[in-house]
Amino acid sequence: MDPITLLSAVDPVLATFLPPELASRMQFGWTISVHIIFASLSIGLAPFIIYFTWKDVRTNEQRYARLRSFWVKVFAAGFVMGTVTGIPMSFQFGTNFPQFAEVAGELIGGPLAFEAKMAFFLEAVFLGVLLYGRDRVKDRTYIISSVLVGFGAWLSGFWILIVNAWMQTPRGYEMVTRNGMEIAKLTDPFAAFFTPRMPWMYVHMMNASVISVALLVAGVSAYIVWKKPDAEAWNTALKLAVVLLIVSAPFQAVHGDAYGRHVEDTQPQKFAAMEAHYETGQADLHLLAFPKSPEALTDPRAENLVTVSLPAVGSFLASGGDFDAEVIGLNEYEENPPVALVFWSFRFMVGLGFLFIGLALWGGFLMYRGRLADSTRYLQAMIAASPFGYAALLTGWYVTEIGRQPWVIQGELKTSEAVSSTLTGAEATLTLGGFVVLYVGLMLTALYILKWLVREELRSLGIRESSGGRWHGPIPWVSSDD
Amino acid sequence: MTDPLLPVDAYLVESLPEIWFGAVLFALGMYVVLDGFDFGIGMLYATRTDERERETFLAAFGPVWDANEVWVVAFGTMLLAAFPRVYSRLLADNYLLALGFVVALVFRGLGPELREQRDDERWKRYTDYAFIGGSVFTPLLLGMLAGRWLFGGATLPVALTGVGLVAVSIVTGAAFLAAKTEPGLASELRAYGIGATLAYLGGVVVLLGTVVVTDAGGAADAVLSLPVAAVVALSVAVGLGGSVLARRDRYQAWLASALALPTLLTILVAILLYPTIYPPTGLLVREAVVSPLALNLVTVLGFPVLLLVLWYFKFLYGVFSGPIEGEGYGG
């Protein structure tokens, strides 16, 4: 008897398993959350890698060689993690959501195959050259390899987001019956690839990756500069990261505002969930919102919240200038997404976004005064902020993905209809548990690798972590392992 | 609205669905050949205790394994793009096998990557376990998945397909390493390679015999066909010939013949499948394929890129050709 049959025979045990749909959704949500951290690490690091490689090869300056070597190692570790978490994800379309794969195969299969062939291969092949080939290829080939690796990462995001954007605002297909099943048949590739959502999503996601990695680079650099203020390479990296943040953080806010209007136009239900807006009519904008009771935390209706709101500004933002504009409320729909998750995720993301703008402006001011490396407080703030970019990026994804529920393909296919009909609760729950354990291990390992790399760097700069410099504690978000 | 450059209601060429059937299996074959020798290296790694030899093994596949692994993604996404019904049924019907395969692949990928991050004996031991375990289970489970694809639920043929893929991976891994390392080490690897070749050939014969006797997955007739006999005979000739070459220390030639074995295995899979594409349900290639416009599009955009990818691989293997020097390639 196989283990699953054995378990199925035990009723009380069976009752503790999650329903297949819920377990599958949690599994997919969990795996994509971990995967996206590593995928965006590649995307955000790409400009740094290209710049450091180019400067290293062209100027032969020690500091660029140091930065290239350090960040290429981080990139490589992130790429491996991204690959090993990405392959299970692509399989889950078939294992957990086969109806989705079958219904949408004509529309999503092409872009996913292009991603593998055009982008993934490019990244993997030339990363091999970048990691092992310094003495085996010409300088120019080496620089070109770094550009191709970075280009591969950005192109990868492009094809993946074509798929996701299509799921948000599907176009270019018609539903037909084939082999006894209603499937989406491709009728217009251009419309299907360049859906209304595509440009919004691509710009927002790529910029979010750049912000996240700029914060990470700034945090690591700030830590090393703190320990060794005259570390030339790391002062360079810190400045570069802050400059990138000054450009990218305010841009994200401006872009995000316009993106919000686009969401209200194309997915009004998601917009209403973002604002916990139930009654159709004029919408306020809740700047701060706190639940009056624990129940209101999971169902944040406006009347159950203590709010600091700007009256009618929700309408203003949704319409792009009209305070009286009618915003459709959640009561119009039969099924709604888990509103609280969307509502709080959205607030978390936006709040962090403004924090990043503050950090960018502060850094810009210090740089203008020539005191960037001297401000202990700023270095501290940047060290503390280093994981926040990822927090914003993840909550942004929750708004996008959870906000679209109950639909997997907006208006066409519900998530409940997409899930495997042969999957048992036991299979889905056990594999969910497996993925949780495995991926927690992966993330801890990734953090330790970063920690070891930082420690190695400090050692080679002549600093031991426990002595010297201005700061004596451990790296705040990685606990000591020895 | 539709793109006038592409035919909407007819395939670019009449046989495009069959061409895509071939293309999907080509991607699978590339994966089995290229990542196959990586798995073999991982399994042979278990036979080494000397740190310098282990480092040499890791250096042999370090620059290329990332790229080799992408072929499984290419295979999966090409199958989804051309035959979404097969993709979804194959993975949904073999849920635990498919996820087990990707988890094993996670361990195989992480082991060597993590090993070099820390100079600590215990750490190295654990990462080595991950590498070796992943290298055994990935081909085993992939082979079993292929067995289920071909023969449905029949236990013995499915298990034998898994073991066969493990054996053939050891052959290619040994030949690849022998071609890149010093003569002393190469002659030790040769013994493993020859043993695995005989095990593999024996396994294929037993597998096909079992299928004929039990008619597993209704594949008995397909096995008793001339093309299958030809591929099996060719495999035996190539396997035995390669072993003779290995004994004469002609490792480059041995490598070429060793790589032919998984290639022939993939061809065998193609023969056993066609004209169905999912034998357990009797689904035909023509029934499972996507509509003309979708297939024309992935052909026009995808095939030139596939040629470019092959060129990248030529470049990559060119850069890292020749014997492994000292501790690796330097970086």
Image (cartoon, rainbow, N blue to C red):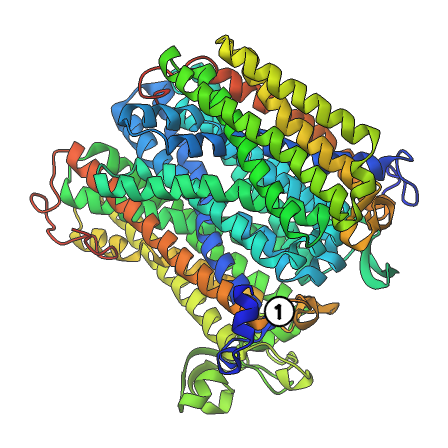
Visible residue check, residue A308: yes
Q: Please, is residue B175 above or below residue A34 in the view?
A: above
Q: Chain of mark 1?
A: A
Q: Residue at (73%, 43%) from the top-left corner? A: B211
Q: Is residue B35 left or right of residue B330?
A: right
- In the depicted structure, whether residue A41 falls above or below residue A298: above
Which residue does the numbered mark 1 point to in the structure image? A404
Q: Residue at x 72, y 23 (%)?
A: B233
- Residue at the spot 86% in from the left edge and 59% down from the top edge: A179
Residue A241 in the image: state x and y as whole percent.
34, 43
Q: Quadrant of the N terminus of chain A?
A: bottom right
Q: Is residue B281 above or below residue B315?
A: below
Residue A287 point in image, percent of width and height = 43, 76
Classed neighbour count for the residue bearing mark 1: other residues with Cα under 10 Å, few (<14), some (14–19), many (≥20): many
Number of numbered tags placed on the structure image = 1
Q: Secondary structure at mark 1?
A: loop
What amino acid is labelled 1 in the image? Arg
Question: In this view of the protein, can residue A148 be seen by the observer?
Answer: no
Left-right relation of A289 to A90: left
Quadrant of res B6? top right
- Foreground residue among B97 and A241: B97
> Residue B298's spot in the image, x, y percent?
76, 40
Q: Residue at x 85, y 43 (%)?
A: B3
The residue sitting at the left extreme is A467
**Image spot of residue A159 (x, y percent):** 63, 45
Q: Which of B185/B155 is in front?
A: B155
B23 left or right of A440 in image: right
Q: Is B150 situated above or below A384?
A: above
